[in-house]
Image (cartoon, rainbow, N blue to C red):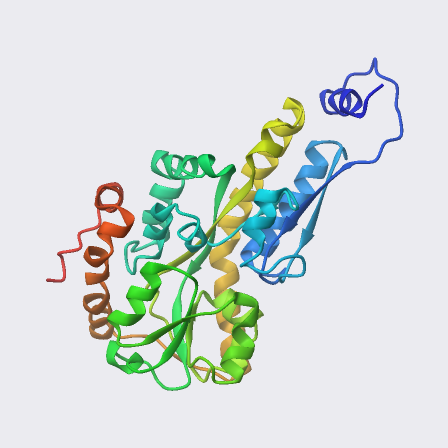
Amino acid sequence: MCLRTWILGLVLGCSALPVIAAEPMVLKFSHVVAPNTPKGLGAEKFAELAAQYTAGAVRVEVYPNSSLYKDKEEMEALQLGAVEFIAPSLAKFGPLGVRAFEVFDLPYIFDSAEALHKVTRGPLGQEMLALLEPRGIKGLAFWDNGFKSFSANRPIRRPEDLRGLSMRIQSSKVLDAQMRALGASPRVTAFSEVYQALAAHVVDGTENPHSNFYTQRMNEVQSHMTLTNHGYLGYAVITNAKFWNGLPGSIRAALERAMRDATEYTNTIARAENEKALEAVRSAGTTEIHEPTEEERIAFKRALLPVHKAMAGWIGEGLIEDIYDETGFDPDALE
């Protein structure tokens, strides 16, 4: 009896098939953040549920903290079939040629998690995931991390306080334009190298959700952080389309169920994990945290909203307008 037949019978609970000792199908899930971040916890939850829902026929091995591939390497590894699952930040799809995903990098395009989820949990989000298929990639889900804060080694009260600083970004035309709109110099740096770059003063500051900031110990090398919530950092969980389509139907259905439940878990805990990380930064006492006044927040929005129009030709004006319509966002409200 072939392994595939045995697995199928096991998943369907077919008692007619004899019990045969067999090794589980081992699948690799690589990511670049710490295990105790929303993405890290989500990957572990997916691994747990995949084993449960396939009755042990599948074992997902999770490799955190760039232990298998760095963020510059993992996309190619997925396309070559060297790893089955990754969850890159949405900015990573721009360099792949799918510019639409850089819409998530636009500053202040989402005023709340509720507005964001109208896109990521709705038909527009599914249409965006489908754009990956011509690249041989199957998009499975959107996972939240959270909204970003600016950090540096000097106080950040107003947009002009970032002028002249070298700021770490992911590779993204939108994030490049965002930093330039503030008078800062963007510097693309791999996530696994950010701590050392900050410690060595290769870059002066960065932007992160609090869970990434704390778990990567950036609070040790950044004396100031301002809770701007200016941008969103999220991920798309993806797999190799050829691999995915070649799975037995029952296994694929079980993994889809595991991904749905892991996604709900991840997006539920994301806000709490970021709040917990922020309190840990406060307790560490190494980083002064500033909560912007309403006047300061409006100043940041006015400085950054022009990036939407500047990047419309790159991302697609129609997509940006679709998100405005879906979320009720009015970019002219501050003018």
Q: Residue at 29% x, 66% y: name it.
A: 178
Apparent side of residue 264 relative to residue 307 in the rendered image (left or right): right
Image label count: 0
Q: Estimate the x, y position of residue 227 in percent, counting from the top left.
A: 37, 71
Q: Estimate the x, y position of residue 196 in percent, counting from the top left.
A: 56, 78
Image: 95 above or below 256? below
Look at the image and tell me whether residue 225 can be seen.
Answer: no
Q: Estimate the x, y position of residue 135 in percent, counting from the top left.
A: 47, 39
Quadrant of the image occupied by residue 300: bottom left
Look at the image and tell me whether residue 214 can be seen.
Answer: yes
Locate the N terminus and report the quarter of the image it occupies.
top right
Q: Nearer the viewer, residue 36 or 28?
A: 28
Apparent side of residue 221 relative to residue 163 in the rendered image (left or right): right
Image: 161 above or below 77? below
Q: Residue at 80% x, 25% y: name it.
A: 3
Q: Residue at 58% x, 53% y: name it.
A: 74
Image: 205 above or below 87? below
Q: Estimate the x, y position of residue 54 in percent, counting from the top left.
A: 71, 31
Locate the C terminus and report the quarter of the image it occupies.
bottom left
Identity of the residue furthest to the top in this view: 16
